[in-house]
């Protein structure tokens, strides 16, 4: 028989065979939530979004200036306003990429569709053959042209340096690129004596999957009530469960071709389903939090603010879980330090929007995750096409830390890669699949950064 017991508020797992008892104490490590660096001290929605780009360019422009001098040495670095005096000469300009796309979300377009002035078209991305790329600084913008301008790898909001020359038609011929690059590692991650592991899941979708067998199997596994002694030793090594968004729902309720009374009925039904799903999620999390530390990130369809950074779900929504010290609500995006490992990630909106803006079907989520490291920005398309708070003095989504583990949630499939930077940075990149469809969780070893995909099902 396998059961849970507690000893001095520390959870242990017991395996009883005859009169012998093996006591496995769950490992514990130091946890620091660093997500406060993503939250503005005061809320002020009167500011224009242009301030974000100005702050982004000012901070990353300084980083690029030193990288440009190291990469291209004596090549002249110019402002866009000075280009006309150096037409045809090789030079470097620094600015923010802007991708002009006619199918981007537009409030004017939404209003015209609302009044049925045009027929709305269903699109999977914002791209078309008429897309154009510009580089803009504090005052001007210039169109970028050339074979190196790949529309499918460019999105709005990326700060970069461009080597090339101004053409007679006023465009800029691109010959090379330079990006801010990965943040230098400040915390040296040494081998931990605890040999702890973390579990990453996303997309529980309790509205549709609260009674799912895989959910119950996962709960029993992480609580140490499944498997033999060897399996329980592995379960006891898990120091924290991280749920990367969409725990309550993973899609938006749509009311198509319904009159007002039908819509009200559907809204009332959906509200009741959400309340019921939230209560079941609370029960699920409280059971796990009695055995293991839990961090819950909000997702795109969870009941919290829509603009990034999303704040943690309110404690009133999860009364049972919130009473436990082992349960923490995280922001989205989220940054923390577990033992000596820096962990960073999101519930998936930044990469989902990047894919829509780029339009490429050949670039995987892991590759986009790698690009955000090189761009040194967690959400480059915010606030252009990704809703975000109007930061004024600083762009808080600029990466300040080099993570050891960097993940994105609610992906279509599981992917992972051990990425190595120019300054010996080593980052484990992880694409977490939706649990509601894949019935899988990702186990990560904090010492070796090795990953393992665990499947919960009857197959």
Image: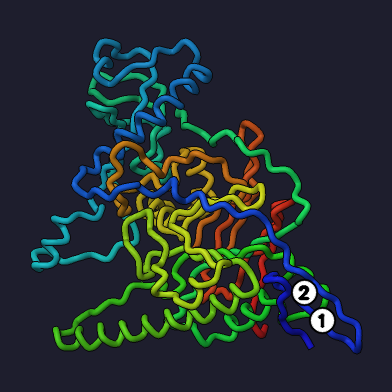
- Residue at position x 24%, y 23% from top? 170
Badge number at residue 26:
none
Res. 51 image quadrant? top left
Residue with the mark numbered 1: 15
Say whether marks 2 and 1 touch (CB < 8 Å): yes
Near-viewer residue (265 or 132): 265
**What x and y, as percent, mark residue 128?**
29, 50
Q: Earlier in the sequence, mark 2 or mark 1?
A: 1
Residue with the mark numbered 2: 232
Is residue 128 something one can see in this rendering?
Answer: no
Q: Is residue 94 above or below residue 186?
A: above
**What x and y, as percent, mark residue 357?**
35, 50
| Cα gap from disc 2 to disc 1, whole angstroms | 9 Å
Question: Which quarter of the rendered picture does the C terminus lie within?
Answer: bottom right
- What element does badge 1 sit on? strand
Near-viewer residue (66 or 102): 66
- What element does badge 2 sit on? helix
**What x and y, as percent, mark residue 37?**
44, 45
- Residue at position x 67%, y 38% from top? 188
């Amino acid at each position: 028989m396998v059961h849970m017991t507690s000893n001095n508020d520390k959870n242990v797992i017991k395996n009883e065979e005859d009169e012998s008892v093996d006591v496995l104490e769950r490992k514990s490590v130091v946890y620091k939530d660093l997500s406060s660096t993503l939250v503005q001290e005061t809320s002020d929605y009167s500011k224009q979004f242009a301030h974000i780009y100005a702050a982004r360019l000012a901070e990353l422009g300084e980083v690029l200036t030193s990288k440009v001098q190291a990469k291209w040495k004596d090549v002249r670095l110019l402002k866009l306003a000075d280009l006309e005096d150096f037409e045809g000469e090789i030079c470097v300009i620094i600015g923010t990429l802007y991708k002009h796309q006619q199918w981007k979300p537009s409030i004017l377009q939404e209003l015209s569709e609302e009044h049925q002035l045009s027929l709305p078209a269903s699109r999977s991305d914002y791209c078309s053959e008429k897309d154009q790329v510009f580089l803009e600084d504090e005052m001007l913008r210039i169109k970028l042209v050339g074979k190196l301008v790949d529309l499918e790898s460019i999105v709005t909001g990326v700060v970069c340096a461009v080597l090339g020359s101004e053409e007679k038609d006023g465009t800029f011929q691109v010959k090379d690129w330079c990006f801010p690059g990965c943040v230098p590692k400040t915390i040296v991650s040494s081998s931990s004596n605890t040999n702890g592991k973390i579990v990453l899941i996303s997309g529980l979708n309790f509205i549709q999957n609260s009674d799912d067998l895989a959910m119950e199997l996962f709960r029993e596994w992480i609580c140490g009530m499944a498997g033999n002694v060897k399996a329980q030793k592995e379960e006891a090594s898990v120091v924290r469960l991280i749920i990367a968004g969409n725990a309550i729902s993973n899609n938006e309720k749509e009311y198509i071709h319904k009159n007002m009374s039908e819509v009200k009925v559907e809204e009332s039904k959906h509200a009741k389903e959400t309340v019921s799903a939230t209560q079941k999620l609370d029960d699920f999390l409280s059971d796990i939090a009695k055995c293991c530390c839990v961090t819950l990130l909000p997702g795109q369809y969870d009941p919290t603010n829509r603009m990034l950074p999303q704040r943690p779900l309110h404690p009133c929504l999860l009364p049972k879980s919130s009473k436990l010290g082992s349960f923490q609500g995280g922001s989205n995006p989220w940054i923390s330090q577990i033992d000596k490992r820096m962990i960073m990630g999101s519930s998936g909106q930044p990469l989902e929007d990047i894919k829509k803006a780029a339009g490429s079907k050949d670039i995987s989520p892991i590759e986009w995750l790698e690009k955000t490291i090189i761009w040194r920005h967690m959400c480059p398309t915010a606030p252009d096409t990704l809703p975000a708070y109007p930061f004024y003095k600083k762009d808080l989504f600029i990466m300040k830390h080099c993570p050891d583990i960097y993940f994105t949630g609610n992906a279509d499939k599981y992917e992972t890669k051990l990425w190595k930077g120019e300054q010996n940075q080593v980052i484990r990149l992880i694409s977490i699949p939706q649990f509601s469809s894949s019935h899988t969780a990702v186990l990560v070893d904090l010492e070796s950064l090795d990953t393992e995909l665990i499947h919960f099902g009857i197959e």
